[in-house]
Amino acid sequence: MTETVVTVENAPNNNTAKPNEGNGLSFIKLNVEYFKTLPGIIKIIELILGIICMSCASPAYLSGTHWFLFAVTISFISTLIWSFVYLLSIREALNLPIDWLLSEMINTGIDTVFYCIGFIVQLAVWVSPYSQVIRVRNLIAGVFGLLNTFAYGYGTFMLHKEWKSSRTTN
């Protein structure tokens, strides 16, 4: 009778990858701490005020409100994109030759101009007497647009200060 001997050895573990490695998402790191800083709080305020502006001015009954909603929506989307850039730490993950601060400052400055023109148009259009409920709601949207103009302006100022301090002078 012949005997068969089986020797079991521990095979080398080739599966030492971390959970996020290999799935293409290893560069994503949530950065919730950013929203506890002043620039992060300003972004949250801009988003909240943008939602209030959109909800008070919708639906657009007059052509001036169309411009206002366009300005608010474009600014809201761009701020949402920048919020995700910071939340997901995309700036740190991508090695692109982009001056991120300058890009964000220019974008926020353009959003400030959009909001400034938008709230002026919104308030000018709704000064004339219309239905009381619709008029008050749209005037409130214009006032919140004014507040968001200040928020975007302050955000642009803060980004300009940060961008100036990040540049090295030789």
Image: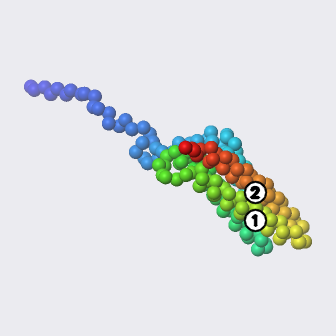
Please tell me which residue is depicted at 35% across the width and 37% down the height of the picture. Answer: 15
Please tell me which residue is depicted at 71% across the width and 63% down the height of the picture. Answer: 114
- Identify the residue under disc 2: 149
From the viewer's perspective, is 119 left or right of 11?
Answer: right
Task: Name the element at disc 2.
Answer: helix
From the viewer's perspective, is 139 left or right of 92?
Answer: right
Q: Which percent across, then down, holds residue 99?
A: 55, 52
Q: Is residue 46 visible?
A: no
Q: Write down the quadrant of residue 123 in the picture.
A: bottom right
- Check disc 1: other Cα within 10 Å, few if <14, some if 14-19, many if 20+: some
From the viewer's perspective, is 82 left or right of 22?
Answer: right
Q: Which percent across, then down, holds residue 88?
A: 55, 46
Q: Which residue type does callout 1 highlight?
A: Ile
Q: Which residue type does callout 2 highlight?
A: Thr
**Which of pointers 2 and 1 lies earlier in the amino acid sequence?**
1
Question: Which quadrant holds the N terminus?
Answer: top left
The disc at residue 117 is 1
Q: Is residue 106 visible?
A: yes
